[in-house]
Structures are given as C-alpha cells and as structure tokens.
Amino acid sequence: MYKLIKTQGHAKRGEFYTHHGIIQTPVFMKVATCGAIKGALSALDLEKIKCQVVLCNTYHLHLRPGDELINEFGGIHKFINWHGPILTDSGGFQVLSLAKMRRIKEEGVYFSSHIDGRKIFMGPEESVQIQFNLGSTIAMALDECPPYPCDKTYMQNSVERTVRWLKRCKNKISQLNSEHNKKQLLFGINQGGTFADIRIENAKIISDLDLDGYAIGGLAVGETHQQMYETIEKVIDFLPQNKPTYLMGVGTPENILECVERGVDFFDCVLPARNGRHAHVYTNFGKLNLNNAKYIKDENPIDSKCECETCKNFSRSYIHHLFKAREMLAMRLCVLHNLYFFNNMTQEIRNALDNGNFIEYKRKKLEDFKNQD
Amino acid sequence: MYKLIKTQGHAKRGEFYTHHGIIQTPVFMKVATCGAIKGALSALDLEKIKCQVVLCNTYHLHLRPGDELINEFGGIHKFINWHGPILTDSGGFQVLSLAKMRRIKEEGVYFSSHIDGRKIFMGPEESVQIQFNLGSTIAMALDECPPYPCDKTYMQNSVERTVRWLKRCKNKISQLNSEHNKKQLLFGINQGGTFADIRIENAKIISDLDLDGYAIGGLAVGETHQQMYETIEKVIDFLPQNKPTYLMGVGTPENILECVERGVDFFDCVLPARNGRHAHVYTNFGKLNLNNAKYIKDENPIDSKCECETCKNFSRSYIHHLFKAREMLAMRLCVLHNLYFFNNMTQEIRNALDNGNFIEYKRKKLEDFKNQD
C-alpha cells in the first residue's frame, strides 16, 4: 500500500508498505545483479549505507544459480541475507541486451543463455513464476524494451503486446499468491519510447489494471536527458499518483533531482557502483576522478561533509594509491562512498519535501554539482 | 620489551610491548603488501577479525606511492588508518623475487623496479631509512635470502655479508632514532638455509647484538616441512628466548602449531588471503574448496563453529554462487573468514599455553585438520 504523505508540484513524498518493511520515497534502489553489489559489498554493508531496497536481476539469477535452487533455500532474502524489500526485474531487459539468438513472439521470448548457449523460453507466466520462486517483495511484469530510435509502427505493436503480457502477468501472480498464501507485489511498465501519444494511451490502459505500482521503462536508452524529462512530464498525469512511480535504470544525481520534481519516486541505476569501480566518485561539489595525479598527496577525504565509512577513515591519497596498486579495496571504498552519497541525497530530498522546500534544495544542489574534476 | 609469560617445552607465551600497543604472542601477522589486505579488506576489517599486527612491504611501498610521500603524510599508520603495531620487511626478499637485473654487492643491492624498470640501489642504510620514513613499529634488517638449494660456500659468504649489513642497519636505526627522538624497533634475521652449523654460528653472532627481536629467515623456500622443523630445532637454542622469535613467511595452520612447539612466536604468511581468493577456506575439520559443485545447495556456513562475519551471515551455497558469478564479494568473504580462522587459532594457542595444555591442544587440532575436501 502506497501512502502519499506530501506533494510539492508534481514531486511526491510517499511511504510504500510491504511485508518486508516500509519504503520511504523518493528512494534509490541498489542493484545487486547476481545477488551481490559489484565492488565486494555484502548485505551487511548495505545496512551500513542506509540502503532501503535491493534490486536483483531475474535473468541472471534464473541462469545462475537458478530460481528453483533459491526457492529451495527459502528465497532470495535468505540466500543473500538481506531482509528488507527486494525488487526483481522481469528479465526482459537483459534478454534483449545480453542474450543471443533472441526471437520475440506473442507467447514470449526465445533466447540462448549468454553463459552456456542453452536455449530458454520466457513468457509472462515464466517470468512471474521465476520471480515468485525467488520470493522478491516486488515483481516486475515482463515487457519488451524497444531500442532507441524505433519505428512508430513497431513501437505501437510492441506496446500493445506488452499490455497483453502484463495482463497475463497479473493473472499468474494472483494465481500464485492465492495458491501459496503470499503477497508478492506486481508493478506494470509503461512503454512507448519518446512517442507521447503511445505512452499516454498505454498509461491509461495499464492504470485501469490497479497494479501495486507503475514503472516508466524504455527511457535512458539513448534519447537526450531533455527528451527523457519531457516524456515523463507528458505521461506522468496519466499514471496513478497514489501508487509508486518507478523510473527504470535512472540515473545521475541530476537526473534524480529533475525526475523527482516531475513525480518519480523509485529509481535504480548501476552508475554509482560502476563509476566507483573506476575511481569516479560523487561529492557535494561535483564529481572527482581519483585516478588523477593531483590526488597523490591529498590528505582530505573524498568529501569532507560526507559521513560514510570511506570518508570518515581514508584519504584521497590512500585511495589513489590503492587504484595504482590495483588493490580491490580501492573499488570497495569508492562504491561504498558512491552508494552512500546516493542514499544520503535521496534522504535530503525526502527532508526537503517534508519541509516544503524541495525546489530551493534542488536549485542549490544542481548549482553545487557544476564543479567537475 | 618482550615479556616471557609462560613456556611449555620450547613453546613460548609472551607479550611484546611496543609504542603502538602490546602484542600477545604467539601471533599471526596480516600481510598488507601495498598497505591493504588483498581481497578488499581495510584496516577497519582487520579490527573486526582481531588482527594484532599488520605487515607492510618496504619494497612495494618504496616504489609506490613512495616512503617519502608516506612520511609527509605522517607515516604508514595514518596512511592506511591502522593504529596498532606495523612491521615492515626490509625489501630484501622482494628485491630478489620480483625485481629485475639485480646485482648483490658488499654495499647493497642494485636492481630495476618491476613496475617501470627504474634503476634503484638499496643498501642496509637505505632499507632502514625507507622503513624509518614509513614509520613502522618494527623494522627488519636487510638480508640476502639465498635460494634453495644453495651451495655451502655461497651460503657461508652470504650469511657473513648479511651480518655486516645487520650491523650497519643497527647503526643506522640508532642514529635515526636518536636524531628524531623515535623508538623504532629492529629485528635481525638468522640465515643459513638448512646448514645447521652456519645457522648456529650466525645465531650466536647476531644474538650478541642485543636487537629487539630475531627472525628466522630463508625457510619455507623449497625445503620439506620436516627439514624446516629440524632446522628450527637446531638453531632455536642459540637465539635469545627473552626476545620475540619470528619465523618469516610461514605458514599453514599445521606449520604454525609445529613451530610454536619449537619456540617460534611471530608468524606471517600470504597463504590465508591468497587461498581465500581462490575459494580455499580453512575450517576446524580441514580445508574446503568452495568451488566444488557439492556446495551448490549447501546452506551451512563455512564452519558452523566459527564466529566470523562470513560464517555468521552467509552460506557455502551463496559463496559458491558468488565465485561462479565472478563477484568480488566471494573473495572478500573467504579472505575475512581465513584471516579470522588464523587469528582465532593463535588465540586458542595462547589460551592453551596459558592453561599449560598446548601439547594436547596441538594433537587434537592436527587430528581434526586431517579431513580434506
């Protein structure tokens, strides 16, 4: 159940009640593709950095170690030792970006595993069954995420098929929940690329299905930030305000601020962990590249205002050295910092919304970010 | 100052007082080659696993980031954020094992950096100066570690030169300590390979120098375990009992038990961290290889009697999966466990010595270790 606590313009401050805990929104979810955050972070670290929701990848976990194994184990929460909310994606995006020899049919997607070439079929029922086996808090409906740019006729047909898949997903999860006395939640996904008319029509249709939440998918796939923001502005009023709104795969701190203002309250992105592994760290005064020789003697922490474990204990000089010496610890320290930075920023956003000063907060923050290394 | 608390046969239970804290012996030191434990462990993790002493490599830190940089920074303790005792090796072993184009002369060693080919000279005074710049608690004297096997005449000449180097190291550290009002400690190194007569003669000479501690070097370089044990047995009575006895680069849990019995009380080895990175983990009932398919569904921790963070939170199945998925977290969890295992075992050894039942403890432990995966 989603409780809308406060709004400022389109911006939403909410609470989402799940059987694994309450999610305070806006929220940035942490991507644990195979059940671990890249950069040697465990679930224990996620608690330390105030993570609220972990996102796991259905495609990856289905291939390895297998959702049936995780089910036997007692579910994904027990397997990775994270007892807060977990969202699983549908696997659709990875099938299209990673798998080989894929064919999309009305019944679902045929593809070959990127690990061993094994032939696999995944339809809406299969995707939901896998996510049910994993036992995530929130399952995502199987969708096609069309490429950018994309021909309008293809897009129209794709979105219509995704709606038919969504209805099949909804039936399947209702059946499984009822059979097993479970309460796994299901989010539907709005598609349509940058075609506002297709997006709006689709948003109206899926809103009527009364799902637990709604995602905006198929953005941040190649269009400009401006096109992404405009697309959200056009479609947002046609998605239910009293449900979570999840912008998939986004994004930078700037993107998050802009999209919160436009009504989004769930985010996820691999960017902070990936950047951290490459010595790119976020600060309240712009990004730094710790590989830069100018940090060789810099005794300051990454960000002297930051309260994360990395900043309270280690210098830029030490981390620069660790990258040069190819020590894994370098990546871990930067990923810890970056994820904390994103969590801390969404905490600040929630505070600003609570206090009714989000717009001033956002303007100040974007100004501070303008420094780049 | 070393305080011998208790003995059982040759086995020593001691306390070594340093200006960075008291070291309870027997002790297993943790190897942080470049100022970090491989496997993404930071100084904060070392506190959690009850580490007492960190060992850093003079050769590596001299080349990168440079001992002068670390000196400007306020020393190695501040640089890596570990405030307990730190021992630095002399660099001699790495010069001989890693560096290219090395030539050993009376004045010291000429070599080329393995990183960039830069030509470097390191004599006893240079090695001590570097370690003084780093600001370690305990410096090691520069020695030559001859290869195994080694011609007796070469060995005799090498050991005699190492003694001359040791005297120069002692003079240099006295001068530096006095000039800077510091109390950096210096350990000398007994050499002689498996030639008992050379070792004994050397032990007598260096014991007269009244150093802060004595290492047995040049073992675990290719000779059998039995040869190593016998060599220690022969030389140990000629090294001062009222000083720390450090067996360099050793070893397995079995080695440690055997060598404690023979009078050693300081150990260091890269083995537990290296093995951990390859899924080989130590338990109270032998070693396991977590890459083995039989662990795919194993919900048990690595060792159900172990109190480490890994064992209290994660299953063999999860760690097996993380190795298959090539997640860095796999290595971190296994290194954490292995280092904890070594620390915990030396704690048990100290308790057994305190209680006067070390021999029974050792027999039971070796029996338990016989299981192998």
Image (tube, coloured by chain):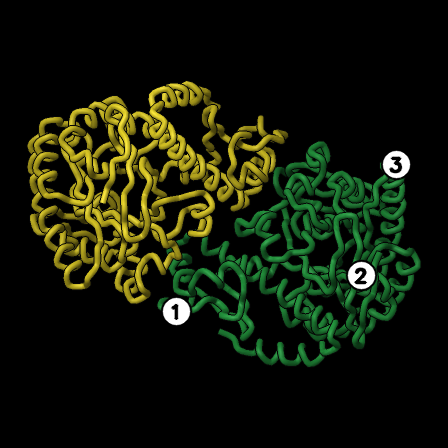
Chain colours: A yellow, B green
Q: Which mark is residue B244?
A: 2
Q: Position of residue B56 (x, y in %)?
A: 68, 48
Chain at tag 1: B
Q: Residue at x 44, y 21 (%)?
A: A368
Q: Are marks 3 and 2 on the same chain?
A: yes
Q: Amino acid at mark 2?
A: Pro
Q: Position of residue B95 (x, y in %)?
A: 70, 48
Q: Residues within 10 Å of mark 1 (few under 14, many from 20)?
A: some
Q: Earlier in the sequence, mark 1 or mark 2?
A: 2
Q: Amino acid at mark 1?
A: Asp
Q: Secondary structure at mark 1?
A: loop
Contact? badges 3 and 2 (CB < 8 Å)? no
State the residue position of label 1.
B298
Tell me, yes or no, if residue B100 can be seen here.
Answer: no
Q: Secondary structure at mark 2?
A: loop
Q: Residue furthest right?
A: B208
Which of the pair A25/B335 is nearer the observer? A25
Quadrant showing the N terminus of chain A: top left
Quadrant in the picture for residue B74: top right
Q: Residue at x 25, y 43 (%)?
A: A97
Quadrant in the picture for residue A50: top left
Q: CA distance from mark 3 to mark 2?
A: 26 Å
Q: Secondary structure at mark 3?
A: helix
